[in-house]
Amino acid sequence: MTPDGGHTPVMLDEVLGHLGPRDGAIYIDATFGAGGYTRGILDAAACTVWAIDRDPDAVSGGQALASAYGGRLTVLAGRFGEMDGLLASHGIERADGVVLDLGVSSMQLDVPARGFSFRFDGPLDMRMEQEGPCAADIVNTASEHDLSTIIRRFGEERHARRVARAIVRARAEAPIETTGALAEIVRAAIPRGRPDRNRPDRNRIDPATRTFQALRIATNDELDEIDRGLAAAEALLAPGGILVVVSFHSLEDKRVKDFLKTRSGGAPRPSRYLPAGDAGAAAPTFDLLTRRPDRPGEDEVARNPRARSARLRAGRRTKAPTWTHAAMAAGGGA
Ligand SMILES: C[S@@+](CC[C@H](N)C(=O)[O-])C[C@H]1O[C@@H](n2cnc3c(N)ncnc32)[C@H](O)[C@@H]1O
């Protein structure tokens, strides 16, 4: 958090280092948030930024910044999974860089009414877009089996079945409507293990953390959105254009790592993909710029503890055609 309650950008120097903003270039900040990356890019060169956020509060908050940069910045509402189409509708078909800073912003986490955090009591909402089904809808209507799957898969919670059972038992008494009520149910359901001397981090984690992460990911379809966002970036980037992605937990990072590995020729191509217009060998669409993820320095983590789990991966777009679904390449749709 910044002193004014905003969001402190994570690994900004490293992001700018990979991106290397140039005069006259076009960059996409696909997760605008409080505009920390956007500001850094615009201040580094006489370039243009198209920023996107699916949260209407972030988009309205960005309009003052757009005015301040007089025509060099446009902030659009939308999902990064659809950024190629969204930008095409504004006449932008090519970009020199795309940055993605995954997950939620401090503004989203720290406003109790948004319902993202168990640290405050608030409605069990968690919707970035502020419309559509919310976390309470999932918690109060999903089957015990589906809840358990969500909590295990998206929260990596080994007590997922216990937690799901406790939720179903509690909601039979009364619907679970608040973050506080859910956090209490989860804490009571998880057995207190012995402190692990080798994993002091684990001992400090609130037992509700993993279930809240799972519900947030499910509510916003976050992991599939990452896959769509990476493919959209591949379609938008000009040859030589740079993709930079900062992620905050292993599930996010795995999607990014697998995408860059596959697209840079380091892993077998999934059979359902073909290069657009060519059923032959798929040429790599990215050169890897980070064999291992970049991590924040100790200074940054001391200044901003939220940076602790950040991992940055980057790639440079080659000239090869965008990979696409075989069915779509054949004109059949997915
Ligand atoms: C970690 S914050 C970004 C912070 C930003 N880099 C800064 O310096 O202020 C992530 C932002 O991405 C947005 N977001 C998450 N998933 C998105 C998606 N699929 N499409 C568009 N925006 C998304 C969230 O609403 C949030 O505002």
Image (cartoon, rainbow, N blue to C red):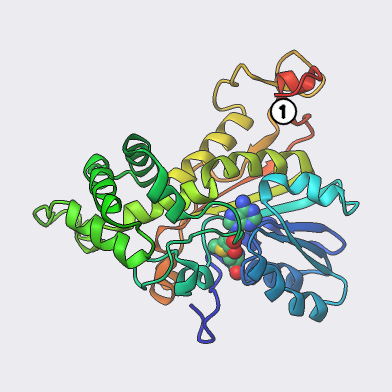
Q: Quadrant of ligand 1?
A: bottom right
Please state the horizontal and vertical placement of residue 40, each as a whole percent of the image: 68, 71
Determine the image quadrant of residue 203.
Answer: bottom left
Q: Nearer the viewer, residue 81 or 290?
A: 81
Q: Residue furthest front?
A: 173
Please state the horizontal and vertical placement of residue 99, each as a whole percent of the image: 66, 55
Determine the image quadrant of residue 28.
Answer: bottom right
Q: Is residue 200 left or right of residue 93?
A: left
Quadrant where the C terminus is found in the figure: top right
Question: In the rendered image, which residue does mark 1 sit on?
Answer: 323
Q: Is residue 85 left or right of residue 253?
A: right
Tell me the element at label 1. strand
The answer to whether residue 249 is visible is: no
In the image, what residue occupies the spot 71% across and 16% down? 281
Q: Is residue 103 above or below residue 269?
A: below
In the image, what residue occupies the spot 72% across and 67% down? 41
Q: Is residue 205 above or below residue 164?
A: below
Q: Nearer the viewer, residue 268 or 129?
A: 129
Q: Is residue 115 left or right of residue 91?
A: left
Please state the horizontal and vertical placement of residue 148, each as a whole percent of the image: 32, 39
Please state the horizontal and vertical placement of residue 55, each as a whole percent of the image: 63, 63
Number of marks in picture = 1
Q: Nearer the viewer, residue 73 or 11?
A: 73
Q: Residue furthest left?
A: 194
In the image, what residue occupies the spot 60% across and 21% down? 269
Q: Is residue 204 above or below residue 95?
A: below
> What's under tag 1, amino acid-wise?
Trp
Q: Is residue 56 above or below residue 151?
A: below
Q: Is residue 51 left or right of residue 165?
A: right
Q: Residues within 10 Å of mark 1 (few under 14, many from 20)?
A: many
In the image, what residue occupies the spot 29% across and 58% down? 208
The answer to whether residue 74 is visible is: yes
